[in-house]
Amino acid sequence: MSGGVDSSVTAALLQRQGYDVIGVTLQLYSGAPDRKGACCAGKDIYDARRVAEKLGIPHYVLDYEERFRQTVIDDFAAGYARGETPIPCIRCNERVKFADLMESARALGAEGLATGHYVRRIDGPEGPQMHRPVDEARDQSYFLFATTRQQLEYLHFPLGGLTKPKVREIAAELGLVNAAKPDSQDICFVTSDYTDVVKRLRPDAGEPGEIVDEAGRVLGRHDGIVHFTIGQRKGLGLSGNEAPLFVIKLDAEARRVVVGPREALLTRRIVLKDVNWLADPADAASCTVKVRSMRPPVPARVSVHAEGAEVELLEPEEAIAPGQACVFYKDSRVLGGGWIAKA
């Protein structure tokens, strides 16, 4: 129970279905505890406790700050220092909620762990499957690709068949204090600018360097690669060019930002590492993939190799960044996914 409306309604729905529900909230960080759009800190913990009291269920707060710092925040900073564009929400699900929290749930004697994520778990002939939700505008399957089959057997997602307006309607009917509470933002632990977090933990990411074109000609200087992502156009400090220039590569070792024309952002081949499969890899030979959480799935072919997988996009995509995830789908089913190592 993060303190938001989704996990609160999840608890209420399970209670309605006759389960003995235990509410668990994770204390993940201490900064800006009352900031709008935060979760798992300060007022959010208080909101979760009030909902648990309203429902009449036990409520526990577990201090996971140190684990969160080591496995999510430090990893986030290290990713930017490598010239990647990391996704801390996936790491949090993978390394905290569905790892440490799952162990705590088992220790409490729970028969399952339920969350407020918008995905569906459907039992198939070979075990549970993960599917996109009914409300595709709320689809969070991209952020859960690293969930293992063994974990999926223990997980429940009661909101997968509901729309967000319906969830808020249920919360209002129950008189929950957070029925109209705004959704949490993507990077919960960033209080102002993400670059401040990265430079504090990895000062090397803020070291100055050169901005060069594809031929290696120096066009300007920058104040650290942490300020740039693949596909970025604004903030380069370059002018007088015939056509707009975009960031097409980040060379962290040389502290170089490489820029080029928009067409240089197009790619059809992606190399993945740390691939997780929720289905038979053969099913991904012809599938659709998402290379960003907010982009629609596009047709692709996925082939397995020794170190991960390779994705061939049937139509080129723009600004594919190392450190992001590539998730495979067959219709609504999540087949698996991996981390983008190279595009």
Image (cartoon, helix red, strand yellow):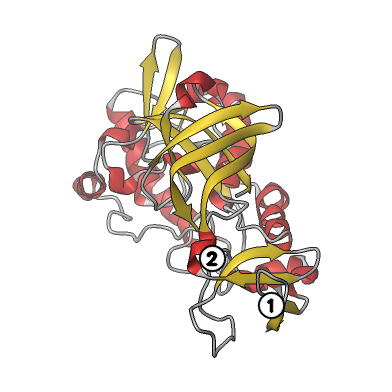
Count up the numbered dots.
Answer: 2
Outermost residue toward the bottom?
240
The image quadrant that residue 305 belongs to is top right
Residue located beneath label 2 in the image: 33
Q: Residues within 10 Å of mark 1 (few under 14, many from 20)?
A: many
**Residue 225 location, x and y as percent?**
69, 71
Say which element carries label 1.
strand
Estimate the x, y position of residue 120 in percent, counting from the top left. 36, 30
Residue occupying the point 42% across, 54% down: 47
Rendered location of residue 238, percent (x, y): 58, 86
Q: Secondary structure at mark 2?
A: loop
Q: Residue 251 sits in which quadrant?
A: bottom right
Q: Is residue 187 visible?
A: no
Q: Amino acid at mark 1?
A: Ile
Height in image: 24 above or below 69? above
Left or right relative to 51: residue 174: left
- Name the residue that disc number 1 marks: 211
Query: Going from the N terminus, do you reach mark 2 or mark 1 first?
Result: 2
Q: Residue 81 at x, y = what percent? A: 73, 62
Mark 2 residue type? Pro
In front: 191, or 340? 340
Between 228 and 199, the one lying in front of the other is 228
What's the distance in space between the residues labelled 2 and 1, CA to CA? 38 Å
Disc number lying in front (2 or 1): 1
Residue 276 visible? The answer is yes
Q: Is residue 314 above or below residue 308?
A: below
Q: Quadrant of the N terminus?
A: top left
